[in-house]
Image: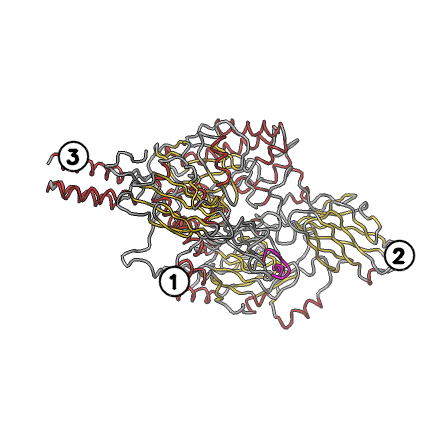
Amino acid sequence: MQRAIITLLLLTAGILATAVQKEIPGDPFTIGYSTRGILIDGHERILTSGAIHYPRSTPGMWDSLMKKAKKGGLNTIDTYVFWNIHEPTKGKYDFYTDRANLPLFLETAKRNGLFVMLRIGPYVCAEWNFGGYPQWLRHEPDIVFRTYSEPFMREMKRFMSKVVEVVRPFMPENGGPIIAMQIENEYGDHQREFGKDGDRYATWCGETAMGFNVSVPWIMCHQYYRVDGIIPTQNGFYGHQQLKRFHRNYPDMPDMWTEMWPAWFQRWGEPAPYRPIEDIAYAVANWFAYGGSYVAYYMYQGGTNFGRSSGPFITTSYDYDGFIDEYGLENWPKYLHLQQLHQIILDNEQLLIKNNAPEPIRMADDPSANAYVYGKLGSHMYLAFLVNSDSSRDITVEFDGLKTILPRWSVSIVRSLGQAQKQPELLYNTAKPSEQVKRAQEHPAKFEKISTGLKTNEIRWRPLRTTGRNTVKSNRPAEQLSITDDRTDYLWYRTQVTLPTECLKGSDAKLILHDAGDVAFVYFNDKFINMQHGQQDQLATFMFDVPEWVLVQNSTVDIAILSQTMGIAHNQRHMETYSRGLLGTITLCEHDITEGTWEMQPGLEGELLMAGDPPLDSLQHGGTKTLDAQWRRYDPSQYKHQMQRQEAGLSAQMHWYAIELDMDTLTQTQETAQDGEELLYGVDLSSMTKGQLWINGHHLGRYWLRRAPSKENYRPCQKCEYSGWYSPDNMCRQRCGEISQRYYHLPRSYLNLPSANSHVAEASGLNTLYVLEELDGHPEHINIARRVSRMPDDKGRDEDDDGQHDSPSRGKLGCGIWGWLLVVGVIVCGAAAAVGLSTVLLKAFNRWRARRGYASLDDDDSVS
């Protein structure tokens, strides 16, 4: 009887130790770190994180994105802080409106039980305009970015102090959700380039971060050199190769992979990047096999580069082939395959965390086959990663009585529950997606048209007029950003020259713009000639043919060049000196015309108005803005004739289109939607060419219908194997030969839709799409489409499994309600004081604890 009572007491205590938990984020908690991970309330944790950038989605999307991230097996959200949206004008901060509402984003994470890694920078890269820096920063006297420069460090510290002030209510002592913060970003390469000043700056970063006296640790990612008090972390497609050296150099620091790249970003004119899910899982499983404790996917949900926020030539879509797509829908193959891996890792958290990184055990006498065991082999409980690092061949191994084939370039995860099992159980293989994942691969996300073209009586158009304002005169072309300050993409350059005699000597007359960027539209005598563009963030040489009608002896020629930027550099050294426009020599028929009388004028009509709202007059009718008399009804049959009658002039080929969206179509879509189905919209602009897009005053971004190279002409389109080191520059590109970006995100929160109780739009509920077309297009063929991504049926799921697999995203030491139910059962059994029954229950409970990754209660050699 005494033994039975003692057994029952131990059993009850063991269950309570795993079932009782603090509700964090939510309740106050403490943060620290050890060599095995981030400490939450003194317990090391496995943290699975994913990047979701708050400015790249709307506040109405945040809750859904975080719920999906949590269900996908994440317990942490990662985001940068974007200086240029929070302080666009020096000293004037915005942390609370629309997509700049950082406190709301943090509160949403907290409400969903998710921790947050806050990466302040304030340099962020992120393929974001100017790397996150505000334009006013480059005008500070004597400033040099990202080195030991007093003006730069002064402004950086001032902004960071403001951020810390804003987010202090979200520190652990206030219930979170912030668990760590980052200063600088990927500074290792730049530190080396700046030499001693780089070293001094890195040290200053560490001292500044520690000086804020916050309760969370600070990190510096992609940081090669030690900075006192700062955790250095890794970025890359793979992370495990660096861990042994990291353990040697930083024995007191946790292993953190701040950017696991599950694919890549896309530029205009490129095929879409794709990374096989088998390779992503291989990289992540290897990370945990080698001892990693924190992984963050960059990006988990990429989102949209709204407005003019993208870096040079980066598409408006920042989808990144993420686990959740730009529109907020699951990318099911990637989402499900990694969800399964996350669940296994988190279910066995205690086994992983309570053991140090193991030494590899060679299998089958093959250097490519190695086992990494957490726990002890034999009769003890363990979790093991069986790794085949060979990219070309499968390997047959026998491990602790289990004979199995390891597919090439894969990791198998096996688990033993100790004496209860004769051989370990195979839980997962990175190269073998489940049947559900395979079905998802057969039915990828797609767009479904909900309109077959817009009604022509809903479209009005007008030619673009020049503004005639803010003219600057100079004896040579001025640098573009010095005039526009990046408030607009556009700057006019104008000059008048006498036709050089060289133009009359031959038939190959050229206007050549040396060192120009990014795009140039050229006009002779107010007639549009052509457009040329560069690529990425490199300056280019543009060559334009001079029309024969210009080649008249002794004639005077008016030359106008509309220069356009396509995003400001996001990752260059000395970004403060970044320049665009007409920077080099300009020749006409090999005659230098750079010196002369030049006029510069920023912007296009309508594009520079407050909040980016395109040209509307000030008249109001029934609370609705109306188009002025300059707008004409669009009739495709008459449009070309109207164009021919239109007087020539600067920007004559450019047009504004005002398109009233069909409310009936959108309403019918809502009525026919299935219960729980998300209604997400995109604009199909395949009938247009190049320009910018607004909806109800919200700037949706740039558009460009450039085609990617065909498969036959582009090597990265010709090969895609999951095995072997991945690089987006030489493999697995998709949609080759197609338009790089055809669809443009139309967020629901930017639409005026009828309420759930009414199908009648209010008078002020019009939805007007404004299109600034720079070249030519057919607006009558613009379509609205729905984004659809349906989850495949899981035919292999148990009937009593509801499919809701929550991750242990709180400070969890057990398994919640099931632990409490078992406590009740134990108490009942205790009342019976049945020795035999308690022994059976103890064995059963040890098996249950083993499945959760905890040590056996009667095992003297259990993990510690």
Give the mark toward the camera: 3 or 1. 3
The residue that disc 2 covers is 554
In percent of width and height, residue 714 lies at 62, 58
Residue 508 among those drawn in magenta: no
Question: In the current view of this chain or complex, which residue is farthest to the front?
Answer: 365
The answer to which quarter of the image holds residue 385 is top left
In the depicted view, which residue is nearer to us: 293 or 307? 293
Which is more N-terminal, label 1 or label 3? 3
Residue 569 pos. (x, y %):
62, 44
Crowd around label 2: few <14 · some 14–19 · many ≥20 (10 Å): few
Q: Amino acid at mark 1?
A: Ser
Q: Residue at x 46, y 53 (%)?
A: 394
Judging by the rendered image, the residue that carries numbered circle 1 is 758
Mark closest to the chain's N terminus, 2 or 3? 3
Q: Amino acid at mark 3?
A: Ile
Residue contact between numbered discs 2 and 3, judged by CB atoms under 8 Å = no
Q: Residue at x 73, y 62 (%)?
A: 648
Q: Amino acid at mark 2?
A: Asn
